[in-house]
Image: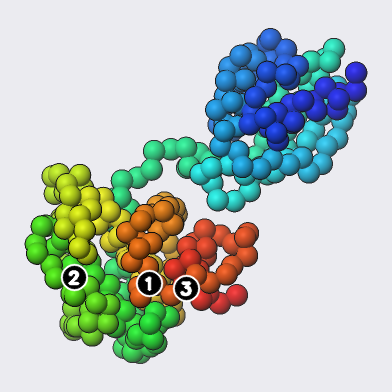
């Protein structure tokens, strides 16, 4: 049998059967090696394929070559929770019409990161606040007066807005009674929260934010917010969204680099696109989404989703 014919059911299973390898001619002692998993028999591999296949959104064989009993395929696939496309070379060895071994070769760092337990929202919040503080420490006099990309505010106004929002969210987490009118974006932008030493003032805001969300029971407890009640995890996630996105606004307006934390971007993307309270209150808080190419990176897609126009 032509080795390509023997591997056709294997790729059909990934493409059309959600990884169900029950009709694939795998040898009982089929062995498989890859960047994230290794198997010494077909039973273990079939179980993994069914589990992984449920997350596969698309699977394509781009090229295929043979060398004797060896079939080399270049494949592209998409799977949850990764936003992009993975590309790999796969080597399948065939004997007497059965696949006896497989080797998958690709850079699995993004997949390992996605499979790992995500950092806690408080850890991401601390990282994001630190990044914002680093940016603020570099802004000079002209930078503070520069126009930012957010609501036609200056960099200083954007920083005031961010500091004010973080303080209000911390107060809500502390179960202080906060009038919803205080969340008016322009009101916060026009209130001086950062004084003569913006970096030091923001550090104090960040400290209060972290103290509020790391207090025992705060993340699990319900809190009154915007006429509703939400768990503390939602408040912390809103704080993370504010810190991450307005940090970008501030850096962009001041002409400074801004390297967002990958885990924070992933968490904010998930939150901003699925959390009902964000979707419900989107009007008046974010501009309409900006179209971007499907292949755009997740940070670009996130910023565009929240109405940010990025330079090409």
Number of other residues with Cα within 10 Å of mark 1, as a class: few under 14, some 14 to 19, many 20 or more: few
Query: What secondary structure is found at the residue carrying circle 3?
Result: loop
Query: What secondary structure is found at the residue carrying circle 1?
Result: loop
Query: What secondary structure is found at the residue carrying circle 2?
Result: helix
- Residue 149, disc: none
Q: Quadrant of residue 177?
A: bottom left
Q: Nearer the viewer, residue 107 or 62?
A: 62
- What residue does disc 1 label? 283
- Residue 288, disc: 3
Quadrant of the snapshot with the C terminus: bottom right
Q: Nearer the viewer, residue 227 or 253?
A: 227
| Residue 197 visible, this orientation | no
Q: Mark 3 near mark 1, Cβ–Cβ under 8 Å?
A: no
Q: CA distance from mark 2 to mark 3?
A: 23 Å
Residue 123 to residue 3: above or below: below
Q: Mark 2 near mark 3, Cβ–Cβ under 8 Å?
A: no
């Amino acid at each position: 049998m032509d080795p390509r014919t023997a591997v056709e059911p294997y790729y059909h299973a990934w493409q059309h059967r959600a990884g169900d390898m029950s009709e694939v001619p795998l040898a009982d002692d089929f062995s498989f090696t890859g960047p994230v998993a290794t198997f010494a028999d077909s039973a273990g591999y079939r179980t993994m394929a069914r589990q992984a296949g449920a997350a596969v959104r698309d699977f394509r064989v781009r090229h295929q070559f043979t060398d004797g009993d060896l079939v080399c395929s270049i494949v592209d696939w998409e799977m949850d929770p990764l936003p992009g496309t993975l590309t790999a070379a796969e080597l399948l060895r065939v004997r007497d019409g059965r696949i006896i071994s497989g080797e998958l070769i690709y850079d699995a760092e993004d997949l390992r990161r996605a499979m790992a337990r995500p950092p806690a929202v408080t850890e991401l919040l601390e990282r994001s606040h630190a990044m914002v503080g680093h940016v603020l420490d570099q802004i000079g006099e002209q930078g503070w007066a520069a126009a930012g990309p957010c609501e036609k505010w200056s960099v200083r106004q954007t920083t005031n807005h961010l500091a004010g929002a973080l303080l209000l969210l911390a107060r809500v987490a502390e179960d202080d009674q906060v009038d919803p009118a205080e969340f008016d974006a322009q009101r916060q932008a026009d209130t001086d929260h950062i004084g003569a030493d913006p970096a030091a003032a923001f550090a104090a805001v960040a400290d209060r934010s972290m103290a509020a969300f790391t207090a025992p029971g705060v993340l699990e407890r319900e809190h009154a917010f915007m006429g509703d009640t939400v768990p503390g995890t939602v408040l912390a996630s809103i704080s993370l969204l504010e810190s991450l996105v307005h940090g970008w606004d501030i850096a962009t307006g001041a002409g400074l680099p801004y390297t967002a934390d990958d885990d924070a971007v992933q968490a904010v993307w998930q939150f901003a696109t699925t959390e009902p309270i964000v979707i419900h209150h989107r009007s008046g808080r974010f501009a309409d989404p900006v179209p971007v190419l499907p292949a755009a990176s997740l940070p670009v897609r996130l910023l565009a989703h929240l109405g940010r126009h990025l330079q090409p």
